[in-house]
Image (spheres, rainbow, N blue to C red):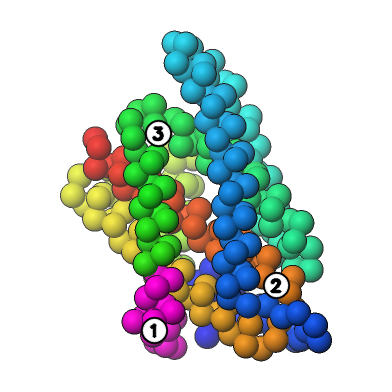
């Protein structure tokens, strides 16, 4: 009964009941679209800043100019994610701010990847949108049944991947060693990235399921912002995994 998304757990909607307007799945998806738009706007600003300098031949200057926004966006996004998870009533404020911060970070990352592999960002965006649409259709038509066994399997796999990424980050930070198949572009590396994209996609169905349960339980309207924020967390992960997969395929 748990979502592997850390901000969407079974206890998320417990003890909540709304006398007036209530949370709906469609309302949550609409707010998710707004958060995505905010991320695109701020991401486009960072991208434009990087692209102007890189086009002029000052690649080092482009990195220097956008690095504060990339790292600042990542750190601010982490703080705002924690705030959204702990202060759900304020998610109508913290969720848009999170999307803005993530946009700055993703815009910089995307610009760097586009410089290395022309056209890769458009492909990644289209694939992310396509995966979201397909998983939503599969969920709404019940082609994918979110059973207890299904939840347990996805939760366990996501937890294992999170632990693997933490180990890789620690090794790179303290020893300079990295786990090869996470970063390499061979068949094993591409296969690993394909698995990660699939796992992120399955997480979307768990998020849809728990949000739908919240709407049935009569959760208050502000929880739509919280659900939209949770979907953003998964979509950011999905986009980054698709971007990584495409970059491996390009090498």
What quarter of the picture does the C terminus occupy?
top left
The residue labelled by disc 3 is: 113
**Which image quadrant is residue 149 in?**
bottom left
Q: Nearer the viewer, residue 8 or 21?
A: 21
The dot on residue 142 is 1
- Examine the structure image and report whether residue 149 is included in the region drawn in magenta: yes
Residue 97, horizontal then vertical, whole percent: 71, 50
Tell me which secondary structure the magenta stretch mostly adopts: helix
Residue 197, horizontal then vertical, whole percent: 35, 59
CA separation, marks 3 and 2?
35 Å
Q: Is 64 left or right of 128, judged from the image as shown? A: right
Bin the neighbour count of mark 3 within 10 Å (Cα to Cα): few under 14, some 14-19, many 20 and up. some
Q: Nearer the viewer, residue 46 or 179?
A: 46
Q: Is 184 left or right of 217, judged from the image as shown? A: left
Q: For the magenta stretch, what is the residue range?
A: 135-152
| SS at circle 2 | helix
| SS at circle 1 | loop
The dot on residue 223 is 2
Q: Earlier in the sequence, mark 1 or mark 3?
A: 3
At horizontal 28% and vertical 42% (from top left) the residue drawn is 248
At horizontal 52% and vertical 73% (from top left) the residue drawn is 207
């Amino acid at each position: 009964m748990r979502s592997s998304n850390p901000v969407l757990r079974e206890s998320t909607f417990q003890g909540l009941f709304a006398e007036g307007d209530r949370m709906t799945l469609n309302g949550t998806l609409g707010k998710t679209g707004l958060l995505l738009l905010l991320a695109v706007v701020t991401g486009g600003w960072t991208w434009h800043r990087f692209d102007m300098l890189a086009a002029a031949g000052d690649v080092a200057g482009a990195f220097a100019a956008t690095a504060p926004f990339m790292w600042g966006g990542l750190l601010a996004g982490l703080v705002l994610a924690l705030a959204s998870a702990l202060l759900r009533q304020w998610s109508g404020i913290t969720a848009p701010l999170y999307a803005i911060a993530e946009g700055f970070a993703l815009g910089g990352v995307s610009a760097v990847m586009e410089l290395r592999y022309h056209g890769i960002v458009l492909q990644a965006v289209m694939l992310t949108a396509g995966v979201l649409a397909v998983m939503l259709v599969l969920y709404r038509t019940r082609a994918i049944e979110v059973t207890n066994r299904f939840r347990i399997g996805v939760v366990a796999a996501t937890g294992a991947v999170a632990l693997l990424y933490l180990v890789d980050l620690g090794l790179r930070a303290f020893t300079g060693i990295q786990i090869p198949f996470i970063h390499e572009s061979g068949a094993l590396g591409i296969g690993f990235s394909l698995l990660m994209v699939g796992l992120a996609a399955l997480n979307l169905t768990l998020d849809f399921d728990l949000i739908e349960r919240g709407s049935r339980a009569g959760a208050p309207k502000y929880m739509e912002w919280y659900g939209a924020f949770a979907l953003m967390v998964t979509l950011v992960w999905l986009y980054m995994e698709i971007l990584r997969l495409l970059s491996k395929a390009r090498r």
